[in-house]
Amino acid sequence: YLSKPSQRLEWQAHRLPNDTLCFENAIMMTRFNRYPLIIDPSGQAVSHLLDFFNNNKNSKRKMIRTSFLDPAFLKCLESALRFGNALLVEDVENIDPVLNSVLNREIFKSGGRIMITVGAKEIDFSPHFTIFLSTRDPSC
């Protein structure tokens, strides 16, 4: 009752396996209050998310894939925050402190603009922004 059959069919079309556990997890990923941490040893959830955001004709947002080890991580984060894209951060065994203000949604208004502080920079914040943290380590 938390998802419609048409929504489940759309998830299946975007590479989500047809089982109850996967549907329950997909429902949680669409109805979250805090940004989710996905523990995904098999990589199925990550491939579903990438396919859902990047190959969905109904979605105008794209997903940016990055990691804390990526030298361009901060640029990817700033771009996603500013333009309202989805951000997938992989291999999250520890949370980088630069994400604290993002994860806590510490937004403020300045001159009619919605802003967030990332590191030492103040960046425009799009209300469409979302972030997914992912790890393959089941002991997280």
Image (cartoon, helix red, strand yellow):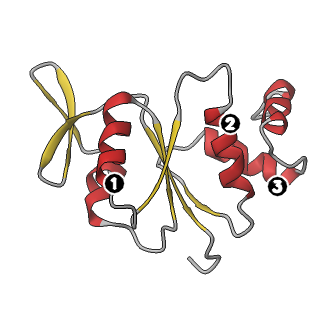
- Pick the residue in front: 76 or 95: 76
- For marks 1 and 2 on the same chain, the one whose residue lies earlier in the sequence: 2
Q: Is residue 121 visible?
A: yes
- For marks 3 and 2 on the same chain, the one whose residue lies earlier in the sequence: 3
Residue that lies at the very extreme toward the front in this rendered image: 71
- For marks 3 and 1 on the same chain, the one whose residue lies earlier in the sequence: 3
Where in the figure is residue 103, as x and y percent of width and height? 36, 52
Secondary structure of residue under mark 2: helix
Q: Mark 1 belongs to which amino acid?
A: Ala
Choose top left, top right, bottom left or bottom right for residue 57. Answer: top right
Secondary structure of residue under mark 3: helix
Q: Residues within 10 Å of mark 2 (few under 14, many from 20)?
A: many
Look at 53% across and 33% down and name the residue there.
62
Q: Residues within 10 Å of mark 3 (few under 14, many from 20)?
A: few
Secondary structure of residue under mark 1: loop
Look at 65% across and 44% down and name the residue there.
49
Could you give the CA–CA distance between mark 3 and mark 1, rounded to whole angstroms? Answer: 34 Å
Where in the figure is residue 63, as x and y percent of width and height? 53, 39
- Pick the residue in front: 7 or 85: 85
Q: Residues within 10 Å of mark 1 (few under 14, many from 20)?
A: few
31 left or right of 3 in image: left
Query: Looking at the rendering, in which quadrant would you find the N terminus?
Result: top right
The residue indicated by pointer 1 is 72
Q: Which mark is residue 52?
A: 2
Q: Mark 3 belongs to which amino acid?
A: Leu
Q: Mark 2 belongs to which amino acid?
A: Phe
